[in-house]
Amino acid sequence: MCSSDLRLLNGIQPGPTLRLEAGDRLKVFFENNLEEQATRVVQHNAYQTPDTSNLHFHGPYISGSLPSDDVTMGLHAGETYQYDTMFPAEHLPGTHWIHPHYHGSTSLQVSGGAAATLIVNDPAGFLPDQIANADEYIMLIQHFDLGNTANIAAQSGDQHFDFTGADVEFLTNSGVVNPTIVVASGEWIRARVVYAGWMADRKSTRLNSSHPRYL
């Protein structure tokens, strides 16, 4: 987790893609490189603690207790933690994602770009050859609403996210706005799509102020 106007995993947007097999043991060393701000709000069930973070592995069938995925554990600025989780041998293949999920700072950090793709690979022979051998495109879709994020930052006492002026709202696909994918006629492709969203209903945000999905 790196400090800037945005919140990013490994300093890139989106974060690195992790791939593993069913039965693998996943170890992630997480270092919170944010800077704790004296202006931070500390108030339960409110936007708060903008520089406290953690990791949530969103989607896979894994333990919800430490040292695995426990969203109630928060790492303060400068703290580190070694996540260690087992993926069962019978775990289905699929496309999942990773994001911070500490109560109070989730919206600010996810809306600021902190998300990454996690893939459990297909076992041999699981898919038809047309799909198994197709070119793969990872499409991690992220929603940026700078006005809403600035409002959340102000409520949580964050001074890093600095945006003023008319609201700007856009989507990125794996870090790119309006990317082009060229597909030949008759060609198979495999699109792994993750919507790394943080709003309960994106379409309503312009009409009804903010509808945050996460604190």
Image: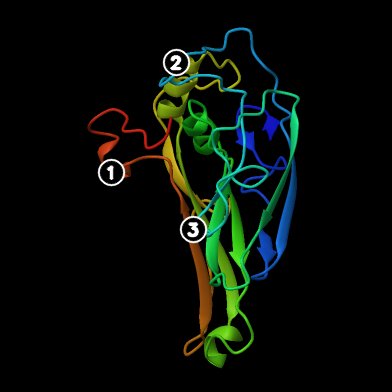
Q: Secondary structure at mark 2?
A: helix
Q: Quadrant of residue 168?
A: top left
Q: Position of residue 6 (x, y in %)?
A: 60, 32
Confirm whether residue 38 shows in the render.
Answer: yes
The reply to whether residue 183 is in sight is no
| First of labels 3, 1 by sequence position | 3
Callout 1 amino acid: Lys
Task: Tell me where residue 67 sits by quadrant.
Answer: top right
Choose top left, top right, bottom left or bottom right for residue 7. Answer: top right
Looking at the rendered image, the quarter that the C terminus falls into is: top left
- Disc 3 marks which residue? 194
- The secondary structure type at the circle numbered 1 is helix
* Sequence-first tag of 1 and 2: 2
Cα–Cα gap, marks 2 and 3 = 28 Å
- Numbered label attached to residue 203: 1
Query: Residue 97, image x and y in percent?
Result: 55, 54
Residue at the top extreme of this rendering: 38
Of callouts 2 and 3, the N-terminal one? 2
Determine contact: label 3, label 1, CB under 8 Å.
Answer: no
Could you say where residue 89 lies in the image, as x and y percent from the top left? 63, 72
Question: How far is the residue under mark 3 from the one under mark 1?
Answer: 18 Å
Q: Which residue is mark 2?
A: 155
What number is the disc on residue 156?
A: none
Amino acid beneath label 3? Val
Q: Amino acid at mark 2?
A: Gln
Which one is closest to the eye, mark 1 or mark 2?
2
Q: Say above or below: 19 vs 56.
A: below
